[in-house]
Image (tube, grey):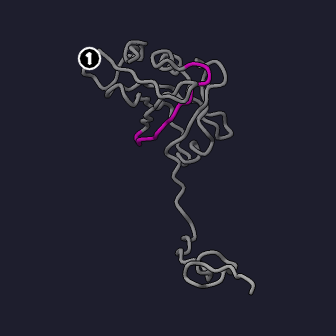
Amino acid sequence: MASTSRTPTGRGRGRGGRGGGSSSLPPLPPTLPLIIDEFFIVVYEDPLVKKAPPKKFADYLDGQEPAKVYLRAADCGPHLWTVEVLFDGQGRMYLDKVWDNFAIAHGVDFVCFLHFKYEGDGVLTVKVFDGTMCRKYYYSDDKDTDDEIDDDVKPCIYPL
């Protein structure tokens, strides 16, 4: 007698995998809202020159072309860095003046990965990852209680 291949339930192995039939997943809504509130920038060039967030993020701002944004390092308290923003007329956005000070203060170097999260009201929270894909952590011993600083290279320069 020939041996037949059977599963533990005694049923033969048919095509279609688990139970066959159609998928039980609900259909997708006709349109999903476009939410682009997080993005990465990989530093392949001089870390101190202006940086361009993805065009999709500029599009997400829905025609608003802010003259400035406020950068906050994820682990450096409430300090905000006021960074000027440029638009090139084709929808590309650039973090320009004061970006270099932020980059120096937070150890941004070649092959760093920068994770940005848009918090609203022009505030972007930034996490810096080094070339080994490990996050850089900093602390600030600045006792100033202002939320906004003079954009010098003072806070968060002490690596843990």
Q: Residue at x 29, y 15 (%)?
A: 142
Amino acid on which the number 1 mark rests in the picture: Asp
Give the extent of the magenta segment: 109-121
**Residue 78, x across and y down, in percent:** 32, 28
Residue 71 screen position, x and y as percent: 44, 29
Location of residue 56 in the rendering, given as x and y in whole percent from the top left corner = 60, 45
Is 18 magenta? The answer is no
Identify the residue at the far right of this view: 2
Task: Give whichever of 149, 154 is nearer the camera.
Answer: 154
Q: Secondary structure at mark 1?
A: loop
Residue drawn at x 26%, y 17% as measured from the top left:
144
138, above or below 153, in the image = below
Q: Quadrant of residue 158?
A: top left
Q: Main secondary structure of the magenta part?
A: strand
Question: Where 18 falls versus 114 (above or below)?
Answer: below
Total labels: the figure holds 1
Does 37 sit above or below residue 157?
Answer: below
Residue beneath disc 1: 144
- At horizontal 64% and vertical 37% (from top left) the residue drawn is 92
Q: Residues within 10 Å of mark 1 (few under 14, many from 20)?
A: few
Left or right of residue 78: residue 63: right
Quarter of the figure that contains the N terminus: bottom right
Q: Residue furthest bottom?
A: 1
* Horizontal arrangement in the rendering, residue 31 relative to residue 118 (left or right): right
Locate the C terminus and report the quarter of the image it occupies: top left
